[in-house]
Image (cartoon, rainbow, N blue to C red):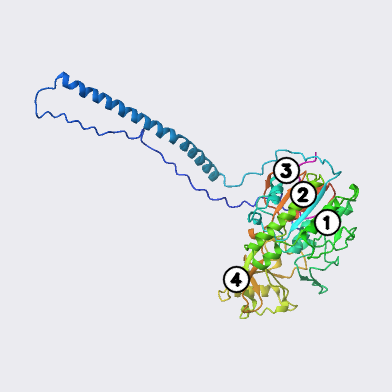
Amino acid sequence: MGSDSLPSTLTSTKPTPIPTNELDEEHDHDDSPSTAALLSFNTDSSSSSEPLSTSNNKPLFIVLILVTCISLSVASAFAYLFFSSRSPSSSSTTTASSATSSASASPSPSPIPLPSVSHARPLTKLNRPKVILISSDGFRFGYQFKTPTPNIARLIANGTEAETGLIPVFPSLTFPNHYSIATGLYPAYHGIVNNHFLDPHSGDAFYMGAIDPKWWLGEPLWETVVKNGLNAATYFWPGTQVHKGPWNCPLNFCRHYNSSVPFEDRVDAVLSYFDLPSDEIPDFMTLYFEDPDHQGHKVGADDPQITEAVSRIDRMIGRLIFGLEQRGIFDDVTIIMVGDHGMVTTCDKKLIFLDDLAPWINIPDNWVISHTPLLAIMPPSGYSPSDVVAKMNQGLSSGKVENGRYLKVYLKEDLPSRLHYSASDRIPPIIGLLEEGFKVKQKRSKNKECGGSHGYDNEFFSMRSIFIGHGPQFARGRKIPSFENVQIYNLVTFILNIKGAPNNGSASFAKDVLLSAA
């Protein structure tokens, strides 16, 4: 689907190695600890020049023998204690020093270890594979360490985890990423290029409640599953209400989005599918939670509200696990837990105002499709996009625009190719990339607030989310390098053993990550 080359399989991001403190080995250059004793004997016989008699010398000789023996015994004991206590330390120092030298010689991460078992575990109760795809919106990688998450930790310990997180597509926004996970396509190819955008031909506006099939290109997983003669059920996921191909959002198997539905009810509804006759149980299911994105936008990434939201998500995972265990099918069901993007704290001291560019160029508000964190500008006909970009960058780099150096404006075709964000006429001709945590506003105001945002360059670590795979075809306790979420489509089709649609993922990715069929 498109001209972009397929991303390489399991590409390591090669994080900078953690600095290791050099171990200073202390070498004792003395052969033995000092045992010199200052023994002072007065042998001067000034009172008498005659030699000592034998009877006088004998007691002194005995005393000297005793003192010498005691001194030798003390020296031997001290030497034994000194060297016996030094030996293990020296040995460990040598080993650690050797490891440090080895790390210095090979700074690159080690290759992914092969799983200890090569074959998938057989199903014990279900007659065919079942996949539950769970999204926790805005679950930034690292949130799982903010608070005890025993249920998520259980999935990780007994499954496969992207060790440094799941990489979102650009822009790192909710609708583009959820639909990339569902289709395996970059936004330029599946059509959902932003949360809000315009059709440049008709002038129609896309909004997050739009369900006209004209917006939603590509083939999402629920459509693929039905095309292959299997059953699908969706409990909230962007695009699931759209009637496309054989998918018509069937009653009781396709819930229309309603943010007021308690999380517990959502989990219980998915569990209830497993109480159906075996041939009616959906083969593929989605489950969506708004948290912790909901809190992140209000309070940023580091507030106690985030910690509580993460705990709540963990409780929902525990509720799901418990329900599957009660039915005796937990080990048969594949659970894939992901987030769509990360989150970064933003404050109004990190602002760039478009009106400050007036000395170089006027950017009216009606040119701007979105301000932040993805700046997208569509000048009217008669204005050269390249001239607009040149003048904007001239002003931003002048040092006279507050925080101007934190925004770089591009013609979309000049964006870094790794973003895959040019091959669609729905993408406005001018795109601005912000540094992490900065925002663009049209004009100055007295409002000062802090919150959280996402949508930034997907290269920023703060935009990463999580990937955890648990089930018969995921190796237990395995860590894999970070990867882009367009690979997930092929994982699901491989697990279900169905034919997928063309996509931007790698055909070999699933074989690299999953255990082969039993």
Q: Is residue 33 left or right of residue 155?
A: left
On-image quarter of the N terminus: bottom right
Q: Earlier in the sequence, mark 1 or mark 4?
A: 1
Which of the two discs, 1 and 3, labels the residue nearer the N terminus? 1
Please state which of residues 212 and 75 is positioned toward the viewer in this rendering.
75
Q: Earlier in the sequence, mark 2 or mark 3?
A: 2
Q: Which residue is disc 1 drawn over?
A: 269
Between marks 1 and 3 in the image, the one whose residue lies nearer the viewer? 1
Q: Which residue is mark 4?
A: 350
User: Upstream in the sequence, badge 2 or badge 1?
Assistant: 1
The x, y position of residue 243, in whole percent, is 88, 62
Q: Nearer the viewer, residue 44 or 509?
A: 44
Name the residue located 72 percent from the left edge and 46 percent from the top edge.
Answer: 159
Residue on which disc 3 sits: 475
Say what amino acid the circle numbered 4 marks: Lys
Mark 4 crowd level (few <14, some 14–19, many ≥20, 10 Å Cα): some
